Image: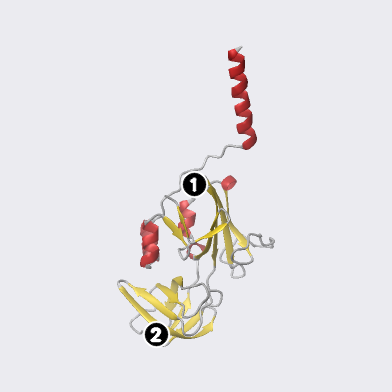
Amino acid sequence: MKRIEYISSVLVLLFVVLINGCTEYPAIQEPDMDRFNQTVHSPALRDSLLAGKLTTGMPYFVASQLFEDWTPSIMEIKIPVASLGSKQRLKETEGLGRDYDDPDIKVFLDEYETEKGKLHVWYQRPDFYTMDVSARDTLCIFLEDTVICSVIKYLTKSSMLTIKDSLPQVSQDTNIYAEVRYKNHPWRKSSYWYALKILNHGRTFKIKALNFEIYPIEILEFNGKSVSSFNWR
């Protein structure tokens, strides 16, 4: 009789597991530190990565590397959305969602289901207009151990700006990491730029062609709440 009761209990337990589902989550991977340090020169962002924190401003490839072992059943990535914070997928048209360098697609969303809850990551194709850059903000470029800053004089177009001071010492062949430090913005203190080039007169900077892997992460949300960072350790 006891054996029958035991078997019945096991069968009930198996039935509950089958009904509720049982998801196994792979280990979150460590990002490529060498690639990160070659791409990002911000001390604050480097310190965050060392502490095991994914933060806004980091290039998208950090998130993709953390969850590279995730399966489609527990994640959905590169969802085209209309704006930062939106979770509504844009309607598919010819080519939409296939070419992530398409300039008509600006904002993307990743959803990751983890053991502790759901993480949403928004990242976007940056340009100076969408990132709210304006005259009197400050552009700071990082050259090895040197940081050179100059006030932005004006924006020529969404992909080009001119600063007050000429920087003839900066090579046109250099891939420039830079930060824009805002003078007066309601919520941005700075933005991060991973692929700028300087033009021949040493005062104008242009955004180079970008792969989506270095689109900056703009917003993080965990379990429905906006967060400044996600600690994966």
User: Image height check: is 136 above or below 89?
Assistant: below
Q: Image point 59% across, 13% down: which residue?
A: 2
Give percent across and percent down for residue 225.
56, 57
Q: Residue furthest top?
A: 1
Q: Position of residue 153 (x, y in %)?
A: 46, 87
Can you give x and y, in whole percent of width and height, for residue 197 in the image?
43, 77
Tell me the SS state at disc 2: loop
* Depth check, front residue: 35 or 62: 62
- Front residue of 186 and 169: 186
* Residue 101 in sight from this viewpoint: yes
Which residue is found at the position 49% from the left and 47% from the top?
Answer: 69
- Name the secondary structure under disc 1: loop
Q: Nearer the viewer, mark 1 or mark 2?
A: 1
Q: Which mark is residue 69?
A: 1
> Which sits in the foreground, 45 or 105?
45
Q: Which residue is mark 2?
A: 202
Task: Name the amino acid type tagged 1.
Answer: Asp
User: If the image is split into quadrants, where does the N terminus sit?
Assistant: top right
Total numbered labels? 2
Say which residue appears at 61% left-offset and 67% top-offset: 83
